Image (tube, rainbow, N blue to C red):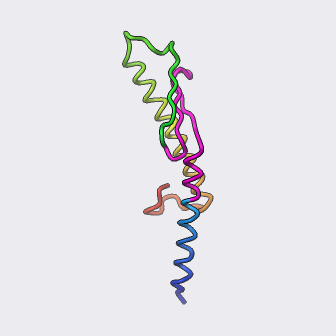
Amino acid sequence: MFDLKKLQRLQKDLQDKMASVQEELAEQKVEGSAGGGMVRATVTGSQELIDLKIDKQAVDPEDVEMLQDLVIAAVNDALEKAKELSQQSMAKIVPGGAGIPGLPF
């Protein structure tokens, strides 16, 4: 027989676990880089850019476009790592849950 109370309890447990994982992700940091490490971007596990370091050798006033490309590449690298970290963390609470509509992973 279908137990609505049990289903609601399971839903609340899942929401609580997801909130806990999201809090943990917000505290974790991952770094992406480009140009052999001349540009490094640090993001949280919740995909917030928190630091950007640019080696002065990467700064060429004659080639600003290259620096812009390096920054974009470093940030995207860091964001991809943060996304992977998020997916791994969420998979711990919903094994095989990736791809369920409405879930953020």
Q: Is residue 14 above or below residue 83?
A: below
* 30 inside magenta stretch: yes
Q: Is residue 13 above or below residue 90?
A: below
Dividing the picture into quadrants, the one containing residue 29 is top right
Q: Residue at x 43, y 62 (%)?
A: 102
Q: Residue at x 54, y 71 (%)?
A: 12
Residue extending farthest to the bottom is 1
Q: Residue at x 37, y 9 (%)?
A: 62
Q: Nearer the viewer, residue 24 or 90?
A: 24
Q: Residue at x 49, y 30 (%)?
A: 74
Horizontal and vertical percent position of residue 32: 54, 32
Q: Which residues are magenta?
A: 20-47
Dividing the picture into quadrants, the one containing residue 97 is bottom right
Horizontal and vertical percent position of residue 40: 53, 27
Horizontal and vertical percent position of residue 103: 47, 60
Residue extending farthest to the top is 62
Horizontal and vertical percent position of residue 90: 57, 56
